[in-house]
Image (cartoon, helix red, strand yellow):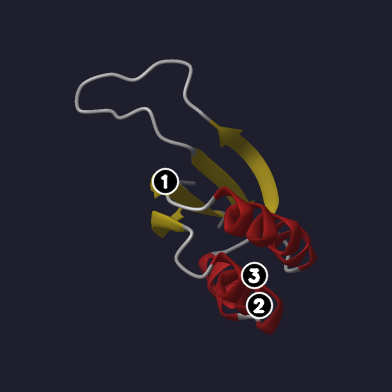
Amino acid sequence: MSAYWVSVYQEITDEAKLAAYAELAGPAIREAGGRFIARGMPEEVYEAGRVTRTVLVEFPSVEVARAAHDSPAYQEALAALDGGAVRDLRIVPGVE
């Protein structure tokens, strides 16, 4: 069953670090089996929604998503981010 990696940027504190992260994270995620579905600022927000950068990545399974996060390549990307953003990242299983 598919799984989705949802990352919401609550605050970006250093654009240069975010750019360094993105340069490493994109290839690491794709090489680990992830496919970017959506990324960017919301067009609309409702209820308690906040206008924050959001990234949605699809993976073949929760296990593949977890392995992508824990991979050496993605950990290198996280090291480059080094406090440049406050994020909420979660892995959510898809529905059948």
Q: Is residue 40 above or below residue 14?
A: above
Q: Which residue lies under the disc numbered 2?
A: 76
Q: Which residue lies under the disc numbered 1?
A: 8
Q: x, y (%) of residue 4?
A: 52, 52
Q: Is residue 16 above or below residue 25?
A: above
Q: Quadrant of residue 31?
A: bottom right
Judged left or right of residue 17, residue 35 is right
Asked if labels 3 and 2 touch by Cβ distance under 8 angstroms, the answer is yes
Q: Distance between the Cα atoms at labels 3 and 1?
A: 17 Å
Most extreme residue toward the bottom, as rendered?
A: 72
Disc assigned to residue 18: none
Q: Distance between the Cα atoms at labels 2 and 3?
A: 4 Å
Q: Name the residue type under label 3.
A: Ala
Instruction: Judge by depth and name the residue closer to the eye, 35 or 41.
Output: 41
Instruction: Judge by depth and name the residue closer to the eye, 85 or 87.
Output: 85
Judged left or right of residue 47, residue 71 is right
Q: Which residue lies under the disc numbered 3?
A: 77
Q: x, y (%) of residue 6?
A: 47, 49
> Which element is circle 1 on?
strand
Q: Distance between the Cα atoms at labels 1 and 2?
A: 20 Å
